[in-house]
Image (cartoon, helix red, strand yellow):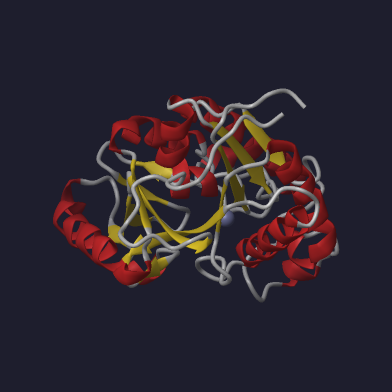
Amino acid sequence: MTELPERRLMLVHAHPDDESINNGATMARYTAEGAHVTLVTCTLGERGEVIPPELRHLSGPALGGHRLGELREAMAALGVTDFRLLGGAGRYSDSGMMGLPDNDDPGCFWQADVDQAAGLLAEVVLDVRPQVLVTYDDNGGYGHPDHIQAHRVATRAVELAAGRGWDVPKVYWNRIPRSVAEEAFARLERDLHALPFDKSASVQDVPGVVDDGRITTAVDGTAYAGAKAAAMRAHATQITVADQPYFVLSNELAQPLFTTEYYELVRGERPAGREDDLFAGVATGAAS
Ligand SMILES: [Zn+2]
């Protein structure tokens, strides 16, 4: 394989837009600092609800193709050149929300054989040899079938790759500390009158919120706030971003846009204090 930079970060996500919302500042920061950043997205989000009225005619594969274009634009904003669709574009389709008949579609990601999908992801892990892999917790952060499946597939891929020559030293789950979420929503309540949005979401609507004690790592991406906002704006079918650091999804409920991004280390030695770098403590060396 071609030689990659010493530090290599891989992120596994369910749909185009999840990476920018959860990790946009982290991805922009590590790319700018010379690390190799690889994004693997599992579906094209073909069942996503479309916000702009002029694009609402898009659905299924046509929406998937459009969202792939949005993903490309988002990656350009973050400086990420290595982004891949698990098994190739269209291999797995969006499963829709839990409990819907969409989940029974044999081509949807929720119905995928975990070992088979993990085998495809393990190939990418063996190709890139990341020291750090980021994904969701076992509830997918908020219970969406594709997010739960992304967690299962990523977890299994790490096991498979470990048996085949690359033991990923650190695995993290996307998190937001409860105190940070509560403060941000209090600020949002005060700012709401000045925003182009009518209603606020609440802490319970935000994926991955946990007690502060579980947070092992905070990545300060303040300097990359503009890149993160631009990447989120690129996903225009899914997200509307205000001038201030707030955004809405298709439910039109305002949420804070976080530029410090938080993580819980679940593989690798838990640090004594809170880390400020996903690569803290890992031995780096050029992959060859
Ligand atoms: Zn998603």
Q: Quadrant of the N terminus?
A: top right
* 4 up-or-down from 56: above or below: above
**Does residue 198 appear anywhere in the picture?**
yes
Relative depth, front residue between 267 and 74: 267
Residue shown at 43% from the left, 63% from the top: 270
Residue 112 in sight: no
Q: How many marks?
A: 0
Instruction: Give the x, y percent position of residue 127.
Output: 75, 37
Say whether residue 160 is left or right of residue 13: right
* Quarter of the picture holding the C terminus: top right
Q: Position of residue 87 (x, y in %)?
A: 81, 45
Q: Residue at x 82, y 63 (%)?
A: 115
205 is higher (above) or lower (below) than 24: below
Horizontal side of 63 relative to 195 (left or right) equals right
> Which residue lies at the image location 53% right of the left edge and 25% below the top edge?
76
Quadrant of the rendered image containing residue 5: top right
In the rendered structure, the answer to whether residue 74 lies left or right of residue 2 reads left
Name the side, left or right, on which 149 lies relative to 16. Answer: right
**Which residue lies at the image location 48% right of the left edge and 42% below the top edge?**
20
- The answer to which image quadrant residue 207 occupies is bottom left
Looking at the rendering, which quadrant does residue 97 occupy? bottom right
Q: Residue 145, percent across and down? A: 65, 67
- Dividing the image into four equal quarters, which quarter contains ligand 1? bottom right
- Residue nearest the observer in this picture, 93 or 261: 261
Q: Residue furthest bottom?
A: 99
Q: Is residue 129 above or below residue 154?
A: above
Q: Position of residue 218 (x, y in %)?
A: 34, 51
